[in-house]
Image: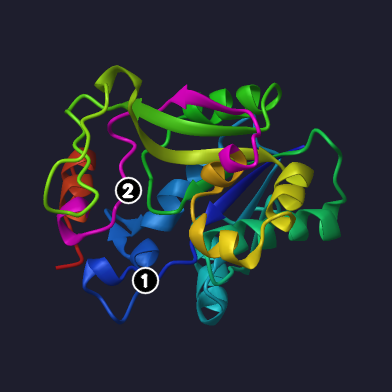
Amino acid sequence: MNYGGILAGGVGKRMGRSDLPKQFLMLGDKPILIHTVEQFLISGDIDKIIIAVPQNWRTYSEDLIKKYCPSEKIDVINGGITRNDTILNICNHIKEKYGSKSDDVIVTHDSVRPFITQRIIKDNVEACKIADAVDTVIPAYDTIVEAKDNDVISNIPVRDYMYLGQTPQSFKVDTFIKVYGSLSDEEKDILTDACKMFVIKEKKVKIINGESYNMKITTPYDLKMASLMLGVENKND
């Protein structure tokens, strides 16, 4: 089976709101989270959707799902302390509730990237059949400058080989559990990106093309841009 894992465990401090995590802010006539979930609901490549949210926002999230997109395909669970902990929670939920087979795939996606396309979802699922993990990326069109001391340039990598990471990131469910379980506590603290974890453990991570508009809504400016892209009023001001 193919599962969609919606990562909605953040609190969105950079949005400047203390009362409401960013995934619950309105984008047009519905919350950002719902825009994202709907793209997974209409996908013919996704069998079940698991949404991981902060524990104290779980009832609120369940109510939103009932209001905007009630479906037996959707489970809402508690997220973890870190991003990888949250993915692990989703994988463990899959194993406990549905069992798991060696070819089961989890397509993990930021709840605040509502402009994901059906093509991106499909490409992630297909690529994960032949790789240990999949990362969605776009080419780095601007020059990348490295400054290890945050003051003086230490390196300018060849741009032709540089990409900017997005989500989804996709994994075989059992493989993610095994790779994460092989990390030391120190590695878990350092390896905050799930695909980097696979690279460090010498697993094959395939890249697929994202889209420049598959943006992550992190700041008030991002939310205004997203509203303009949809041609809707920003009701969060």
Given the image, on which type of amino acid does mark 1 rest? Answer: Pro
In the rendered structure, which segment of residues is drawn in magenta? 199-222
Toward the viewer: 135 or 109?
Answer: 135
Q: In this figure, which residue is indicated by the disc labeled 1? A: 21
Query: Is residue 96 placed above or below 43 in the rendered structure?
Result: below
Q: Quadrant of the N terminus?
A: top right
Mark 1 lies on a secondary structure that is loop
Q: Quadrant of the C terminus?
A: bottom left
Query: Is residue 49 placed above or below 88 in the rendered structure?
Result: above
Query: Is residue 27 placed above or below 123 in the rendered structure?
Result: below
x, y percentage for residue 183? 67, 56
Label 1 crowd (10 A; few <14 / some 14-19 / many >=20): some
x, y percentage for residue 159? 26, 22
Given the image, on which type of amino acid does mark 2 rest? Answer: Lys
Residue 216 is labelled as 2
Classify residue 141 as left or right of residue 122: left
